[in-house]
Structure formats: structure tokens, C-alpha cells
Image (cartoon, rainbow, N blue to C red):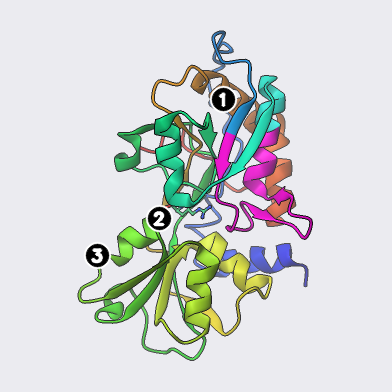
Amino acid sequence: MKRSQFLKNALLSLGATVVLAACGGGDTATTPVENGGEATAGPWVVGTEPAFPPFESQDENGELVGFDIDLMRAIGEQAGVEVEFESLPFDGLIPALQAGTIEAAISGMTITEERAQTVDFSRPYFRAGLAIAVAEDDTETTSLESLEGKTIAVQIGTTGAATAGTVKDATVSTFDSAPLALQELSNGNADAVINDAPATLDAIATGNIGGVKVVGELLTEEFYGIAMPQDSPNLEALNTALAELLENGTYDAIYEKWFGTAPVGTLPEAAL
Ligand code: ARG
């Protein structure tokens, strides 16, 4: 089975309403905005943590590939700005935006209230949610509550890490990347991983991780946004380009390339 087909089925069987119904979609209700005249000429240096397929990863030649990468390149083209990627640790992206060393970050980053106090986000571009992964033979774990007192592996600085931190008496082990956290589970050194469902499902689908399954319902509904420094002069140009791609079919084509299906449903215009 093609990976995209597997992922599609997996997403569907995961209680579909949450992941799929939602995954994205050309929202036609966007109001055209004037292209931000004062946007910087570029290049825009765009930070990403590229160990998060199918959103961002490195191929065998070290080239960045993934849904986010294609989307960001398309946004650059649409906005007439050159885009240059810079690989950074996930928990270093917001500090880099604050320091002004990068113009944007695209990294499957969930739009949260807390982050929105220090950076500005584009309109939502993807609907995701957290899922619990456990060993294939685990029959006990059914919910977040059932992880009480267990060891949970997470990627540092993520919404998954924050959610794991709410579980009573759990030991949370943090890793620099989601694949490392999943490996810990696969090795039997953790009882569970809390990570974005599309990324965990992709790791299972591609065989990057073995002996692991996703349980239960999604824990959250989250929207990804592209982050920019607060009051960035580029935010309007970014949002305009993204809205155009959502309308003109480019977004759908990129979505289909990485998820094997057209986006179902629409994205809200704001997440908070
Ligand atoms: N969506 C989650 C968050 O914002 C995880 C993102 C992880 N992204 C990555 N490229 N490693 O916290």
C-alpha cells in the first residue's frame, strides 16, 4: 500500500471527524487583503525543525522536504519573496523569531495563546491534534488518565510535552525530536508518546517506527500556523499569499501530494 493511502486510512480510522473532516481545506470565505506594501524584500529566512515528517524532514540528499516546505515555498512564490530555510531546534524557533534572526517559522507549530503572546501567527493552515502512542501489545492504555504514574516520552517544547505534564504522577522524558521520543517507546523505555497524530501516524505508516500503535481518541484539536516576529511587516503579505493558495487550488494540490487525499472541510480563519 502506498504510504499516502495508508496514512489516509489510518487518519480515517482514527475517528475521522477530528482529523480528517478537518484537515485543511480551501476556505472560500477569505477576504482579499491588499498585498502588504511594506513587506521586506526578502529573502525571508524561515526556521524549521526538520524531523517531523510528513511536515518537514530531510531526504537522503539532505534536502528539506514535506508539506510545510512545499507550502512555504509556494507562499514565497506567491508573495514574490525568496524563501531560505534554516534548521533549528523546535524550542529554538520562538527565541529566534524574538531575536529577529529569522523572518518566519514553519514547523507544524500549533497556534497557542501562550505562543501568541510572544510571536504573531498566520491564519491557520492545518488542522491536527494530539494522539497517544503505545506499544502494540498494550491493552491498558485507553486515555490520558490511564497514563497516571507512567513514563511518557515527548519532544521538548511541544504541545505534547505540555499535555504530558498534566498527567498525574507521570514521568515525562523529553527528547529533541519526535522520532527520538517514538524510538524510546519502541525500545520499551517509555510507556507512551504524546505527539501530533499526523506525525505519529506517518512514522508508523512509513515503518520509521515499529511495534507501536495509536490509541483512543485525539486528545486535542490544534491548528498549525506560520509564526513571525510580533508586528512583523511581512505578516500581511504572508497571509495574503496563503489565502490565495487556499483559493486557487495550490494548497489542495500540496495537501494531496503529502496526504493522498483532498482536504475535507474548511479551516477556520482564526484559531484563538
Ligand atoms: N504541533 C506541536 C507543537 O506545536 C508539535 C510540533 C513539532 N514540530 C516539529 N517540527 N518538530 O508543539
Q: Which residue is mark 3?
A: 166
Task: Tell me if 188 is positioned left or right of 63 in this view.
Answer: left
Q: Answer with the quarter of the image where residue 24 lies.
A: top right
* The disc label shown at residue 266, or none: none
Task: Tell me if 220 is positioned left or right of 199 in this view.
Answer: left
* Amino acid type, callout 1: Leu
Q: Is residue 50 magenta?
A: yes
Residue visible at 73% across and 54% down?
62
Compared to residue 24, the image places residue 145 above or below, namely below
* Amino acid type, callout 2: Thr
Q: Which residue is mark 2?
A: 158
Q: CA distance from mark 2 to mark 3?
A: 13 Å
Q: Quadrant where the C terminus lies?
A: top left
Q: Which residue is mark 1?
A: 238
**Disc 3 secondary structure class:** loop
**Disc 1 secondary structure class:** helix
Q: Is mark 2 within 8 Å of ligand 1?
A: yes
Q: Residues within 10 Å of mark 3 (few under 14, many from 20)?
A: few
**Disc 2 secondary structure class:** loop
Which percent across, then down, holds residue 84? 66, 34
Compared to residue 103, the image places residue 139 above or below, namely below
Q: Earlier in the sequence, mark 2 or mark 1?
A: 2
* Amino acid type, callout 3: Thr
Q: CA distance from mark 3 to mark 1?
A: 35 Å
Q: Is residue 177 magenta?
A: no
Residue visible at 59% across and 58% down?
51
Range shown magenta? 46-73
Residue 217 seen in the current view: no
Camera-nearest residue between 128 and 212: 212
Camera-nearest residue between 146 and 269: 146
Q: Quadrant where the N terminus lies?
A: bottom right
